Amino acid sequence: MIYIVAGLLGILLGVFMDYTIPAVYSAYVGVAILAGLDTVFGGFVAIIAKKFNMKIFVSGLFGNGILAVVLVLIGKLIGIDLTLAAVVVFGTRIFGNLATLRRFGLGKAEEAYKGYRGKRIN
């Protein structure tokens, strides 16, 4: 329950706080957000697979975020835009996790429909 309250509080603060990220940091923040989303959707997949571990989730959240930001920083230092590489990798993983969640949801909906179809409603 506390996770839901914390998530809703974070969303409300993000929507109603008037804060602008400087353009210099936009690439770093963008890939950090993608890394965070990748970890969150990976956590959802781990939950439905009954393999969720909070230590792995938290270490993945910070580890992926730091790795993505360092990758962009190194790319800027050597003059190569590695932001695109991070976007492709994390985007691919996010879509893969979403596909897994979609298949799981459709499977559950199909099971519910099969159970409902055989019953009479009076």
Image: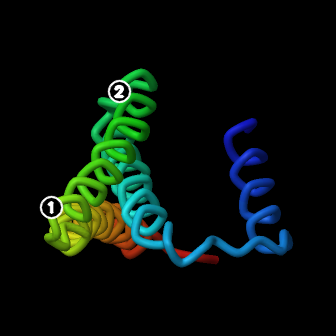
Tag shown at residue 78: 1
How many numbered marks have been drawn onto this rendered protein structure?
2
In the image, what residue occupies the spot 73% across and 38% down?
A: 1
Q: Is residue 79 visible?
A: yes
Q: Residue 85 appears at what percent x and percent y?
A: 15, 68
Q: Is residue 100 visible?
A: no
* Residue closest to the eye, 115 or 34: 34
In the image, what residue occupies the spot 74% across and 45% down?
A: 6
* Distance from the alpha carbon under mark 1 to that under mark 2: 32 Å
Q: Residue 77 appears at what percent x and percent y?
A: 23, 59
Vertical arrangement, residue 10 with respect to residue 56, above or below? below
Query: Horizontal placement of 35 versus 99: left or right?
Result: right
* Residue closest to the eye, 68 or 109: 68
Q: Residue 106 appears at what percent x and percent y?
A: 31, 71
Q: Which element is circle 2 on?
A: helix
* Residue closest to the eye, 4 or 107: 4
Q: Which residue is mark 2?
A: 56
In the image, what residue occupies the spot 72% across and 63% down?
A: 11
Tag shown at residue 2: none
Mark nearer the N terminus (1 vs 2): 2
Instruction: Give the class, few, some or many, for how many residues have Cα within 10 Å of label 1's Cα (few <14, many ≥20).
Output: few
Residue 117, image quadrant = bottom left
Q: Which element is circle 1 on?
A: helix
Query: Horizontal placement of 79 versus 24: left or right?
Result: left
Q: Amino acid at mark 1?
A: Ile
Instruction: Give the class, few, some or many, for how many residues have Cα within 10 Å of label 2's Cα (few <14, many ≥20).
Output: few
In the image, what residue occupies the spot 36% across and 65% down?
A: 105
Q: Amino acid at mark 2?
A: Ile
Q: Residue 67 appears at what percent x and percent y?
A: 28, 44
Q: Are marks 1 and 2 in contact (CB under 8 Å)?
A: no
Question: Where, quadrant-wise, is the C terminus in this rendering?
Answer: bottom right
Residue 92, image quadrant = bottom left
